[in-house]
């Protein structure tokens, strides 16, 4: 297809579907989930009546998770923001009055112009994965902030450590085709709970299990997925590097290495194996708090069963050694030669297979300017510093007051009266309560977008099923209009705002999202995408690394990377280590994975999903509960010196001794004491990538006295 044909087709897709009669609209799930499902939205009489999975999409296979199957409930919620509003109470009170879009833009224009003339870098965007689409994500927003010369945001809160680990070892965010896992005979689920976070992959894992595959779960608690596995290793949080080294130790000791693969397709294996020689199963078992026999059994299974696949996930990289954990685990299939098999190897993210256009957000609009970069995982510190302070903050696709670590510091920063805050949202979230101007945004049913995934190899289109409800506007429209407004205010002072890229329509932004001439789009990939709304990329077919071909400089897997001060993965203590002096005050390690029917904070206000989840809870082992006089159903307070979080106790051996599982992320305002779990977490960062370390957190628990 020609470039002109693609542009025309995307323009047609961007139009709202004709809803004069019953119609089925092709869509894509926008949320931060590896499944990125293909959806079909049924519209009748101008109203969405059903949202279902697309049966023609190989991973979605006609089903949606409970969360997204109720997407219409979210879009039509009576709590949706319907019009622009300005704050009339104190910051955090959530008191607003309705204004017009023109009034909102006038206020924003005045304040941003004032701040920009003092210091463009005093303006900061804050966004993440409230939508994963290229158009409503950073496609237009990034252009706006680059043109202004605003501070850059280092988007680290979820996957930064893992991305860094893959870059240092694999050369990029690449791995096996995750859908090929159904052909594996041994599957390791390392730091992942796919029943909650990757449900469509779980269906393929179950298919493999029925065909005889052996499943191992490596997770600090017995998650829903771990309960369905044949074996479960409940290691201490943050000890994954030691376990990976111990597996490598056994492979080396017992002649289970693939010496030919190592020689042909890797480098520095001798250095990695020398480090592994120091990590016997008994030493690793002591460090990880497990049994040496478990290490031996897992290593022998991994060295002798083919094909063997590892699905690792982002939970394992939310510690001080997060990136090195990913490096160490990714080393295992290179040592054992499992990359030779189509259903073998490992996968954390498939996003590196996607030929994205690195210039979508137009960083060239910065010109010669080099603005500072602020780590979003340390937004609490950034908003509370007096040196070069952030004076204007624009939040979209995120709810930082709820999801960022060290919430009390974040709330103090957002409460500054001298901070001008604009929030684009669907609902009045915790963050929205601190806005000076609150703008109603469209949901996925009301706007156009184009999507790739990090858990499979498809590109998808989302056609709007409805015109925007009430006065909602899409992110892309809002930033397009803000760019026009600021261009009029600043004129030649900021000439980059007049660049045509800031006036591009949604279809043009979607076209700019990918490198359409890349071989991944060869054959029928583009026509199929434009015909049916989803298409598998021409990538990672068969065994993509059977003969090397990693994204490193020489195409070899890199066991030791000399571009960083510590070339080998390091076994290091957590920031908040269980053997430290701090542990004497706060002896329990806390991890905070999502409950089954929520996703970050996006669905926390959907009543039916909250009913399914039940009240916010903490899993605590009977041994730890008994020492504190805690029983199931009791109100308890999880606390440390940063704050406290009141939840319901669930006494269960699903938690290992010394570890509590505090399910998250709920909104602060919905908690009994007004605090969610992130009042406990710290702003400490990971070893590489500057990632958040949510699961590197020491706490204690006490019973809450009954009132009255």
Image (cartoon, rainbow, N blue to C red):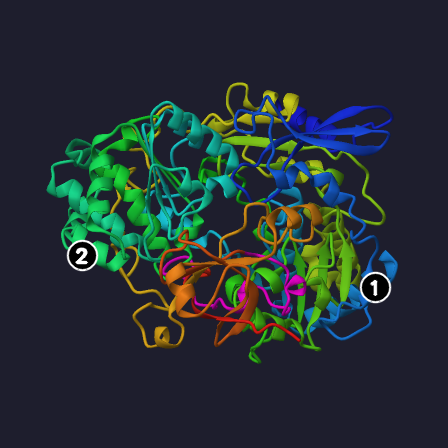
- Residue 314 on image: x %, y %: 44, 49
Query: 198 and 111: which one is in front?
Result: 198
Is residue 447 in sight in this rendering?
no
Give the vertical position of 594 relative to 184 (above or below): below
Find the magenta span and give its range.
Answer: 664-691
The spot of residue 320 in percent (x, y) is 37, 62
Quadrant position of the C terminus in the picture: bottom right
Q: Which mark is residue 219?
A: none
Q: Is residue 261 magenta?
A: no
- Answer with the quarter of the image where residue 543 lies: top left
Q: Is residue 342 left or right of residue 611?
A: left
Relative to the observer, which residue lies in front, 683 or 449?
683
Residue 676 figure quarter: bottom right
Dot 2 alpha-carbon crowd within 10 angstroms: few under 14, some 14 to 19, many 20 or more: some
Which image quadrant: the N terminus?
top right
- Pick the front one: 208 or 308: 208
Tell me the residue that label 1 is attached to. 106
Q: Nearer the viewer, mark 2 or mark 1?
A: 2
Mark yes or no: residue 577 visible. Answer: yes
Crowding near pointer 1: few (<14 within 10 Å), some, many (20+)?
some
Residue 13 placement (x, y as % from top left): 72, 29
Between 184 and 176, which is closer to the camera in this rendering?
184
Q: Looking at the image, is 484 positioned above or below residue 174? A: below
Q: Which residue is mark 2?
A: 283
Task: State how far apart marks 2 and 1 are (Cα).
Answer: 64 Å
Secondary element under disc 1, as helix, strand or loop, is: helix
Prevailing SS of the magenta stretch: loop
């Amino acid at each position: 297809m020609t470039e002109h044909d693609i542009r025309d087709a995307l323009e047609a897709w961007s139009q709202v579907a004709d809803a004069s009669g019953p119609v089925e609209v092709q869509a894509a799930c926008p949320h931060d989930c590896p499944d990125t499902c293909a959806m079909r939205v049924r519209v009748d009489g101008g109203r969405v009546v059903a949202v279902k999975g697309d049966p023609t999409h190989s991973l979605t296979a006609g089903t949606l998770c409970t969360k997204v199957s109720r997407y219409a409930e979210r879009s039509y919620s009576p709590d949706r923001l319907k019009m622009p509003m300005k704050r009339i109470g104190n910051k955090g009170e959530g008191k607003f009055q309705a204004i017009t879009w023109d009034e909102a833009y006038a206020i924003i224009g005045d304040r941003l112009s004032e701040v920009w003339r003092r210091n463009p870098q005093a303006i900061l965007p804050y966004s993440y994965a409230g939508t994963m689409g290229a158009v409503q994500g950073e496609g237009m927003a990034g252009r706006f902030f680059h043109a202004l010369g605003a501070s850059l945001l280092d988007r680290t809160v979820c996957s930064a450590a893992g991305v860094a680990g893959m870059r240092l070892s694999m050369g990029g965010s690449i791995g096996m085709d995750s859908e090929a896992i159904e052909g594996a005979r041994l599957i390791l689920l390392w730091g992942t709970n796919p029943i909650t976070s990757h449900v469509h992959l779980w269906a393929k894992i179950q298919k493999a299990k029925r065909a005889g595959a052996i499943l191992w779960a490596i997770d600090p608690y017995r998650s829903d997925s771990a309960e369905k596995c044949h074996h479960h290793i409940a290691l201490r949080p943050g000890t994954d590097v030691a376990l990976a080294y111990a597996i490598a130790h056994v492979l080396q000791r017992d002649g289970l290495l693939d010496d030919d693969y190592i020689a042909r397709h890797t480098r520095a294996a001798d250095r990695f194996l020398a480090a592994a020689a120091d990590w016997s199963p008994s030493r690793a078992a002591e460090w990880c708090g497990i049994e040496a026999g478990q290490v031996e059994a897992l290593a022998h299974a991994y060295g002798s069963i083919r094909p063997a696949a590892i699905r690792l996930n982002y939970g394992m990289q939310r510690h001080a050694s997060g990136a090195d954990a990913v490096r160490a685990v990714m080393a295992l299939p290179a040592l054992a030669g499992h990359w030779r098999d189509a259903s073998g190897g490992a996968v954390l993210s498939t996003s590196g297979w996607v030929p994205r256009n690195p210039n979508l957000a137009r960083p060239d609009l910065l010109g010669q300017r080099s603005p500072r970069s602020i780590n979003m995982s340390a937004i609490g510190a950034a908003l509370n510093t007096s040196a070069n302070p952030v004076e204007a903050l624009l939040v979209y696709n995120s709810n930082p007051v709820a999801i960022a670590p060290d919430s009390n510091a974040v709330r103090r920063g957002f409460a500054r009266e001298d901070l001008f805050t604009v929030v684009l949202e669907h609902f009045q979230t915790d963050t929205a309560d601190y806005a000076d101007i609150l703008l109603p945004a469209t949901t996925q049913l009301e706007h156009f977008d184009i999507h790739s995934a990090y858990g499979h190899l498809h590109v998808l289109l989302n056609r709007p099923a409805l015109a925007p409800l009430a006065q909602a506007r899409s992110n892309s429209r809002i930033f397009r209009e803000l760019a026009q407004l600021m261009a009029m205010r600043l004129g030649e002072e900021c000439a980059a705002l007049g660049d045509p890229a800031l006036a591009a329509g949604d279809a043009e932004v979607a076209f700019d999202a990918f490198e359409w001439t890349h071989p991944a789009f060869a054959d029928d990939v583009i026509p199929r995408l434009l015909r049916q709304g989803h298409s598998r990329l021409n990538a990672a077919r068969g065994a993509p690394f059977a003969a090397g071909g990693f994204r490193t400089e020489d195409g070899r897997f890199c066991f030791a990377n000399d571009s960083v001060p510590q070339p080998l993965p390091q076994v290091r203590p957590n920031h908040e280590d269980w053997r430290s002096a701090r542990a004497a005050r706060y002896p329990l390690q806390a991890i905070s994975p999502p409950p089954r029917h929520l996703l970050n904070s996006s669905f926390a206000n959907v009543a039916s999903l909250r009913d399914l989840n039940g009240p916010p809870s903490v899993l605590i082992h009977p041994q730890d509960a008994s020492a504190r006089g805690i029983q199931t159903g009791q109100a308890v307070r999880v606390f440390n010196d940063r704050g406290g979080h009141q939840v319901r106790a669930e006494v269960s051996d699903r938690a290992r001794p010394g570890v509590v599982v505090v399910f998250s992320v709920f909104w602060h305002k919905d908690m009994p004491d007004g605090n969610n779990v992130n009042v406990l977490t710290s702003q400490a960062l990971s070893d590489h990538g500057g990632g958040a370390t949510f699961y590197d957190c020491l706490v204690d628990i006490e019973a809450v006295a009954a009132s009255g």
